[in-house]
């Protein structure tokens, strides 16, 4: 069975979950609103991740083996996404971010 995760039903459910979480935390203090923001961002990331993972694949959610295979595919994608973010972050931190002292454009004075 092929589910269209980008269908109106999927977007409606996603919207209802986000609105429900917003209303649930609306009565709370500011720190809960920050948590709510990150929770909504995580839900949106996971939803669009599922859309991209299952876009060209036929996922069978009618059997246990199909659900298990789909979950394995989705979570392996998520692990690789996190590994890529860690690798990019570590490469950015290893870069030399100090300005060059002998840069001629920095040493020019206005006349």
Image: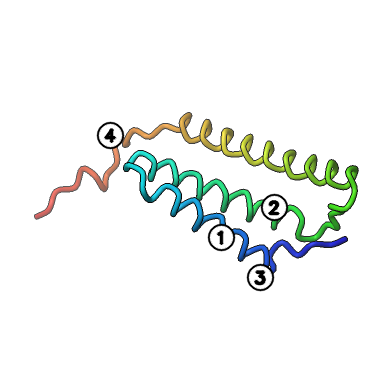
Other residues around mark 4 within 10 Å, as few (<14) / some (14–19) / many (≥20): few
Camera-near label (2 vs 3) is 3
- Say which label, 2 or 3, has the lower sequence index: 3
- Distance from Cα at disc 2 to Cα at disc 3: 15 Å
Residue mark closest to the camera, 4 vs 1: 1
Q: Which residue is mark 2?
A: 50
Residue 2: image location, x then y, percent: 84, 62
Cβ atoms at labels 4 and 1 below 8 Å apart: no
| Residue highlighted by disc 3 | 8
Ranked by sequence position, the earlier of labels 4 and 3 is: 3
Q: Which mark is residue 2?
A: none
Q: Which image quarter: residue 58?
A: bottom right
Q: Which residue is mark 4?
A: 101
Determine contact: label 1, label 2, CB under 8 Å.
no
User: Badge 1 is on which residue?
Assistant: 16
Work out how far the residue at label 4 is from the one at label 3, CA to CA, in angstroms: 57 Å
Q: Looking at the image, which is closer to me, 10 or 85?
A: 10
Task: Give the residue displayed 35% in from the left and 39% down from the top.
Answer: 31
Q: Nearer the viewer, residue 32 or 71?
A: 32
Determine whether 100 is above or below 15 in the image: above
Quadrant housing the N terminus: bottom right
Q: Earlier in the sequence, mark 3 or mark 1?
A: 3
Separation of marks 4 and 1 at Cα, in angstroms: 55 Å
Q: Nearer the viewer, mark 4 or mark 3?
A: 3
Marks 1, 2: nearer the viewer: 1
Q: Is residue 31 left or right of residue 7?
A: left
79 with respect to 96 (left or right):
right
> Compared to 87, does 10 lie above or below?
below
Looking at marks 4 and 2 on the same chain, the residue that comes earlier in the sequence is marked by 2
Q: Is residue 2 left or right of residue 104?
A: right
């Amino acid at each position: 069975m092929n589910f269209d995760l980008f269908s109106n039903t999927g977007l409606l459910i996603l919207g209802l979950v986000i609105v429900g979480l917003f209303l649930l935390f609306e009565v709370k203090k500011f720190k809960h609103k920050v948590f709510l923001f990150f929770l909504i961002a995580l839900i949106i990331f996971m939803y669009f991740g599922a859309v991209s993972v299952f876009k060209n694949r036929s996922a069978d959610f009618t059997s246990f083996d199909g659900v298990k295979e789909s979950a394995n595919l989705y979570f392996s994608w998520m692990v690789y996404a996190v590994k890529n973010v860690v690798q990019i972050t570590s490469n950015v931190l290893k870069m030399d971010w100090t300005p060059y002292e002998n840069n001629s454009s920095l040493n020019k004075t206005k006349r």
